[in-house]
Amino acid sequence: MTTDGIGGQIEVLFHNAQASVPTGNTPEEYDAFIRAEIVKWSKVVKQTNVQAD
Protein backbone atom coordinates (compact mmCIF):
# COMPACT_ATOMS: atom_id res chain seq x y z
CA MET A 1 0.00 0.00 0.00
CA THR A 2 1.36 3.40 -0.96
CA THR A 3 1.59 6.30 1.44
CA ASP A 4 3.01 8.85 -1.02
CA GLY A 5 1.17 12.17 -1.09
CA ILE A 6 -2.37 12.99 -0.08
CA GLY A 7 -3.87 10.27 -2.29
CA GLY A 8 -1.81 7.66 -0.52
CA GLN A 9 -2.76 9.03 2.87
CA ILE A 10 -6.45 8.88 1.97
CA GLU A 11 -5.99 5.33 0.71
CA VAL A 12 -4.42 4.33 4.03
CA LEU A 13 -7.23 6.01 6.00
CA PHE A 14 -9.89 4.16 4.01
CA HIS A 15 -8.04 0.90 4.40
CA ASN A 16 -7.63 1.37 8.15
CA ALA A 17 -11.29 2.35 8.57
CA GLN A 18 -12.35 -0.58 6.41
CA ALA A 19 -14.52 1.88 4.49
CA SER A 20 -14.07 -0.05 1.29
CA VAL A 21 -14.34 -3.81 1.28
CA PRO A 22 -14.07 -5.59 -2.07
CA THR A 23 -16.80 -8.15 -2.71
CA GLY A 24 -17.76 -10.49 -5.52
CA ASN A 25 -21.30 -9.32 -6.18
CA THR A 26 -23.22 -9.53 -9.42
CA PRO A 27 -23.72 -6.42 -11.56
CA GLU A 28 -27.36 -6.29 -10.39
CA GLU A 29 -26.32 -6.39 -6.72
CA TYR A 30 -23.76 -3.66 -7.37
CA ASP A 31 -26.41 -1.56 -9.09
CA ALA A 32 -28.76 -1.96 -6.11
CA PHE A 33 -25.94 -1.05 -3.70
CA ILE A 34 -25.02 2.11 -5.62
CA ARG A 35 -28.66 3.20 -5.87
CA ALA A 36 -29.09 2.71 -2.10
CA GLU A 37 -25.90 4.68 -1.41
CA ILE A 38 -27.12 7.56 -3.59
CA VAL A 39 -30.38 7.71 -1.63
CA LYS A 40 -28.58 7.50 1.72
CA TRP A 41 -25.95 10.15 0.98
CA SER A 42 -28.42 12.45 -0.80
CA LYS A 43 -30.34 12.68 2.47
CA VAL A 44 -27.13 13.54 4.36
CA VAL A 45 -26.21 16.23 1.82
CA LYS A 46 -29.67 17.80 1.97
CA GLN A 47 -29.89 17.71 5.77
CA THR A 48 -26.45 19.25 6.24
CA ASN A 49 -26.67 21.68 3.30
CA VAL A 50 -23.30 20.53 1.96
CA GLN A 51 -22.22 22.34 -1.20
CA ALA A 52 -19.37 21.75 -3.63
CA ASP A 53 -16.86 24.55 -4.06
Image: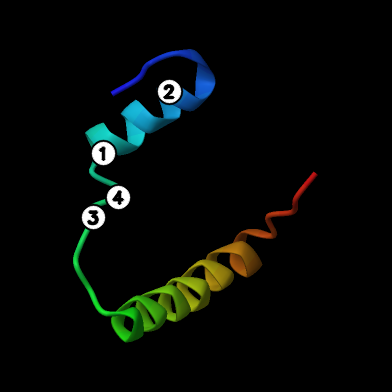
Asked if marks 2 and 3 touch (Cβ < 8 Å), the reply is no
Characterize the local packing of mark 3: few (<14), some (14-19) or many (20 or more) Cα atoms within 10 angstroms.
few
* Foreground of the two, 41 or 34: 34
Give the numbered dot on residue 43: none
Which residue carries the number 3 mark?
Answer: 22
Q: Which residue lies furthest to the right in this view?
A: 53
Question: Which residue shows up at 23% across the image and 44% down it?
Answer: 18
Which residue carries the number 2 mark?
Answer: 8
Residue 13 to residue 37: above or below:
above
- Mark sitting earlier along the chain (3/1): 1
Q: Quadrant of residue 2?
A: top left
- Mark sitting earlier along the chain (2/1): 2
Residue 5 to residue 20: above or below:
above
Question: Which residue shows up at 30% across the image and 47% down it?
Answer: 19
Which residue carries the number 1 mark?
Answer: 17
Give the mark toward the camera: 2 or 1: 2
Residue type highlighted by circle 2? Gly
Q: How far apart are marks 3 and 1 (CA)?
A: 14 Å
Residue type highlighted by circle 1? Ala
Does dot 4 land on a helix, a strand or a loop?
A: loop
Q: How far apart are marks 3 and 4 (CA)?
A: 6 Å
Give the numbered dot on residue 20: 4
The C terminus lies in which quarter of the figure? top right
Q: How far apart are marks 4 and 2 (CA)?
A: 15 Å
User: Can you give x and y, in whole percent of width and height, for residue 42 in the image?
Assistant: 57, 71
Residue 38 to residue 4: above or below:
below
Give the mark toward the camera: 3 or 1: 3
User: Can you give x and y, in whole percent of width and height, for residue 47 in the image?
Assistant: 60, 67
Q: Which residue lies furthest to the top in this view?
A: 4
**Colour scheme of the rendered structure:** rainbow
The N terminus lies in which quarter of the figure? top left
Residue type highlighted by circle 4? Ser
